[in-house]
Amino acid sequence: MDASDKGVDPLTLQPVFDPETVPHDPAFVALDARGGAVDPTELRPTALRQRFALPPPWQPELRADMRLFYPDRPARVASVLIPLMVRGADVCVLLTQRTAHLHDHGGQISFPGGRVEERDVDAIETALREAHEEIGLPPECVDVIGALPEYLTATGYKVTPVIGLIEQPFSAVLDPFEVSEVFEVPLAFLMDPGNHERRVLQLGATARTFYAMHYSTLASESSGRRYFIWGATAAMLRNLYQFLRADRVHPASTIRP
C-alpha cells in the first residue's frame, strides 16, 4: 500500500512468521489436482476483454485475510492495479517487490497500488495514479478491462483489484522509497493451479490459511531469481483464476476462513 502510519513501531507490523516455512495444507492436494489450468487461448488480450465485458456468475474464493494488525482500526479503502503486460502472443503479470523498511507488507511481493485519496474519482483512478507514482506507468498506457471484488488484507486495507492491459512499451521508473524491484510472471503460470500452494499457519487455537506461489526466472532455481508470492497478492491472483474458470467444470473451494 502506501507509507503511512509513520508513528507506529515497524517491528509490530512485520510478519511474525516466515511464510515460506509454514506447512502446506494437505487438504489442498486433491482440490488442486482436479482444478485444471486456464486454457491459453483464454489468456489472450481479446479473450480477457470479452471475459470481463460479459462476466459469468461467480463468487470469489477468498475475500479477506485474518486481521493480524490494527484490529480496532477501521478498514482503509485502497486499490491496486493488476498490470497485464502484452508480450506478443503472451501476457505477463507485472509485480513489484516492496522495500523492506515499509511498515505495511514490507519486502513482500505486491501489485502497484495504495490508499484512496480525496482527489481520486474512483478505484480505477486510485490504481492508475498509484501505478504511475510507484513504477512510472503512464495511465494512458493502461486499458482497464475490469475489476475483481474487494479484498480485506491482514493490515486492514479494503482493496479493489483493477485489471489493466498494457500493450504499449514503457520504461519503469521506480519510487525508491516504496519499490525495490519490478518483474514479470507469465499469466499462464499464475493461472495454473499446479503452481498454487495453500499453507496453514497455526496461531494458538486459530489457523490462518493462505495461498502462495513460487516463481523462478530461470528453469533452475539455484541459478535464477526466486520469488515467493503469498498473502493478499496470491489471494487476488487465486480469485482471478477462479473468475476465469467460473463457468468451467471445477470443484468448489473448501478453504477455511
Image (cartoon, rainbow, N blue to C red):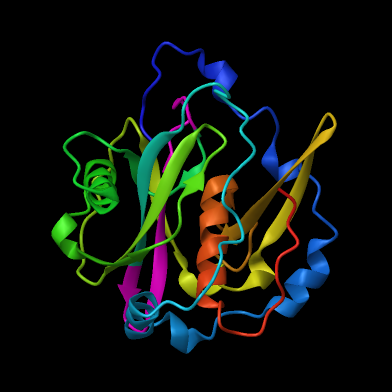
Q: Position of residue 58 (x, y in %)?
A: 54, 71
Q: Position of residue 100 (x, y in %)?
A: 48, 30
Taking the spot 37% from the left edge, 49% from the top edge, the residue there is: 80
The residue closer to the viewer here, 218 or 236, is 236
Q: Quadrant of the N terminus?
A: top left
Range shown magenta: 85-104
User: Is 99 part of what is drawn in magenta?
Assistant: yes
The residue closer to the viewer here, 47 or 99, is 47
Taking the spot 42% from the left edge, 10% from the top edge, the residue there is: 7
Quarter of the image holding residue 119?
Answer: top left
Task: Using residue 128 as the reference point, say whether residue 60 is left or right of it.
Answer: right
User: Measured along the vertical axis of the image, is residue 207 above or below residue 104?
Assistant: below
The residue closer to the viewer here, 157 or 108, is 157
Q: Position of residue 76 (x, y in %)?
A: 41, 33
Q: Is residue 225 visible?
A: no
User: Measured along the vertical axis of the image, is residue 136 above or below residue 157?
Assistant: below
Q: Position of residue 159 (x, y in %)?
A: 43, 45
